[in-house]
């Protein structure tokens, strides 16, 4: 079921689930939020979750679990070695992806560590449609480089291209020739993309790109962390795919790759990760990294309860009633913001609604982190926690200069089956208010700047007293309590 038809109403996203357990939320008064923002060093990762009303930081590990997934946890087979739960999970992955060999990892970045450690040596290049922060950090840590070849339209905020995550095939082939195939560690395709607005890849592009790689004998790797959204988009947007089942599409995609890895904090609606490998020799060449960094081969740092739940979650990721919920809520939110004239990435992708901070707060220079400032403004004015996905999420160049991000985005994630449509309406309303007061928002500067993945633990401060003035304007409109 992709969308319910209404009798006297335009279609709206309709939840195909009901609520059984709830978590109480609280809305701190604005001045308290301002204080919390200072305490968190103007970094939304440093906020306490209890001080947040709408936690839209990420979907990672916070998607709602079904009753079936939760009850499966009870039958988890606790064993250090040979857990039956692990074999159930492995068999489910084999069934869905058709790859024989599996290495467990405690989360997605642990899988990235294993792959980078195995294939990346100084000077080698990893070609991608687009990078993800942790994937890139592991590659550069080992002296490798990343080449991003997403189609030009993928970096344009406004577009009606259905698959903005596609890799540019001509540039891919040219890059392989220029770098020489021997120097390419592997080609990594992320479907769907995280940092450029949750935009999907088409099956046609995946197939063509991996065929080019095969021609040159290059290893192909799929990051399937956001595959469930991508499956939905392929089914509803790609010509000739609507009559194929999500399972068929999954297998068609999988058949293109040598290796697939995933974060089960996303794919599988639980917490964990893993690597699937087609070739035994390739599996054997990575195997020893699992007990060294993760844990024994039949748990890889994951709790057996989580493995049991994600085995159910993998099946749920094949159900259109389940996987349509996220993209449809994103689409609803994006359309409402776009109609108001708010710069937002279109078309809506998976994962979340993405505000284009380079236009929203275009008066803030990139060196003062416009997306970082906007994300803080949304917490102060509305208790909404988003995530900066722009220059602040980049790492500095070797000479210490800022590496300017190609997009300055604020991501408002929609963890699956977590928020209601009225909560979504609240978010839309507050983003509109912030947009109407955007001139009041100023920049940020670092006072503690870690070298790697600085967005997680960096501490910043505002360049002026703009947060106080913004909070007072908000209180003038909504009162002390909101
Ligand atoms: C596309 C993609 N790859 C890899 C990762 C890393 O996964 P994890 O957070 O489980 O380490 C993420 C996490 O957000 C992601 O979105």
Image (cartoon, rainbow, N blue to C red):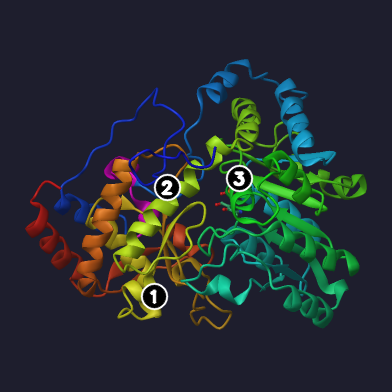
Comparing 431 with 161, the one in front is 161
Badge 2 residue CB within 8 Å of ligand 1: no
Q: How far apart are marks 1 and 3 (CA)?
A: 29 Å
First of labels 1, 3 by sequence position: 3
Query: Does residue 460 appear in this view?
Result: no
Q: Residue 273: x, y in percent? A: 65, 42
Q: How far apart are marks 1 and 2 (CA)?
A: 24 Å
Residue in view at x 43 percent, y 35 percent: 15
Label 2 element class: helix
113 relative to 165, above or below: above
Residue 254, percent from left and from top: 77, 48
Residue 211: horizontal and vertical position, in percent?
Answer: 84, 64
Q: Are marks 3 and 2 in contact (CB under 8 Å)?
A: no
The quadrant of the rendering that contains the N terminus is top right
Q: Nearer the viewer, mark 1 or mark 3?
A: 3
Binning the other alpha carbons within 10 Å of mark 3 as few (below 14), some (14 to 19) or many (20 upward) gives many
Highlighted range, magenta:
43-54
153 is higher (above) or lower (below) than 285: below
**Residue count near mark 1 (Cα–Cα under 10 Å), binned few <14, some 14–19, many ≥20:** many
Give whichever of discs 3 and 2 has the lower sequence position. Answer: 3
Q: Mark 2 points at which residue?
A: 329
Q: Where 115 sits versus 396, above or below? A: above
Identify the residue position indicated by label 3 in the image: 228
Report the residue marked by disc 1. Answer: 358
Q: What element carries label 3?
A: helix
């Amino acid at each position: 079921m992709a969308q319910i038809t209404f009798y006297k109403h335009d279609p709206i996203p309709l939840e195909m689930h009901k609520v059984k357990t709830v978590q109480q939320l609280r809305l701190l008064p604005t001045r308290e939020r301002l204080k919390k923002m200072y305490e968190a060093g103007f970094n939304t990762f440093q906020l306490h979750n209890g001080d947040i009303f709408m936690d839209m930081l990420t979907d990672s590990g916070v998607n709602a679990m079904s009753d079936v997934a939760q009850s499966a946890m009870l039958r988890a087979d606790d064993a250090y070695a040979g857990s039956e739960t692990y074999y159930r999970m492995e068999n489910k992955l084999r069934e869905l992806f058709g790859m024989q060999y599996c290495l467990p990892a405690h989360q997605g970045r642990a899988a990235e560590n294993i792959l980078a450690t195995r294939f990346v040596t100084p000077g080698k290049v990893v070609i991608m449609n687009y990078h993800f922060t942790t994937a890139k950090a592991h590659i550069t840590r080992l002296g490798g480089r990343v080449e991003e070849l997403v189609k030009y339209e993928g970096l344009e905020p406004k577009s009606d291209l259905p698959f903005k995550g596609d890799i540019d095939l001509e540039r891919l082939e040219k890059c392989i020739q220029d770098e020489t195939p021997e120097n390419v560690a592997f080609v990594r395709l992320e479907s769907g993309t995280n940092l450029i607005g949750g935009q999907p890849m088409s099956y046609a592009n995946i197939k063509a790109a991996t065929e080019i790689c095969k021609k040159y004998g290059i290893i192909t790797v799929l990051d399937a962390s956001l595959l469930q959204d991508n499956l939905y988009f392929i089914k509803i947007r790609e010509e000739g795919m609507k009559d194929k089942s999500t399972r068929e599409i999954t297998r068609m995609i999988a058949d293109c790759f040598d290796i697939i890895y995933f974060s089960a904090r996303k794919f599988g609606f639980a917490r964990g990760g893993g690597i699937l490998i087609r070739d035994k020799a390739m599996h054997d060449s990575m195997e020893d990294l699992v007990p060294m960094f993760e844990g024994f081969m039949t748990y890889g740092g994951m709790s057996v309860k989580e493995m049991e739940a994600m085995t159910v979650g993998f099946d749920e990721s094949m159900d259109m009633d389940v996987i349509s919920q996220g993209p449809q809520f994103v689409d609803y939110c994006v359309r409402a913001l776009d109609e108001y004239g708010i710069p937002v990435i279109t078309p809506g992708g998976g994962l979340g609604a993405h505000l284009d901070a380079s236009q929203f707060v275009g008066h803030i220079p990139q060196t003062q982190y416009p997306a970082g400032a906007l994300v803080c403004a949304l917490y102060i004015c509305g208790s909404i926690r988003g995530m900066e996905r722009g220059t602040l999420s980049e790492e500095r160049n070797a000479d210490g200069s800022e590496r300017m991000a190609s997009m300055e985005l604020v991501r408002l994630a929609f963890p699956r089956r977590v928020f209601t449509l009225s909560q979504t309406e609240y978010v839309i309303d507050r983003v509109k208010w912030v947009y109407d007061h955007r001139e009041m928002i100023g920049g940020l500067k670092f006072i503690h700047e870690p070298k790697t993945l600085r967005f997680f633990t960096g501490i910043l401060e505002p360049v002026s007293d703009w947060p106080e003035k913004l909070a007072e304007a908000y209180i003038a409109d909504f009162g002390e309590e909101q």
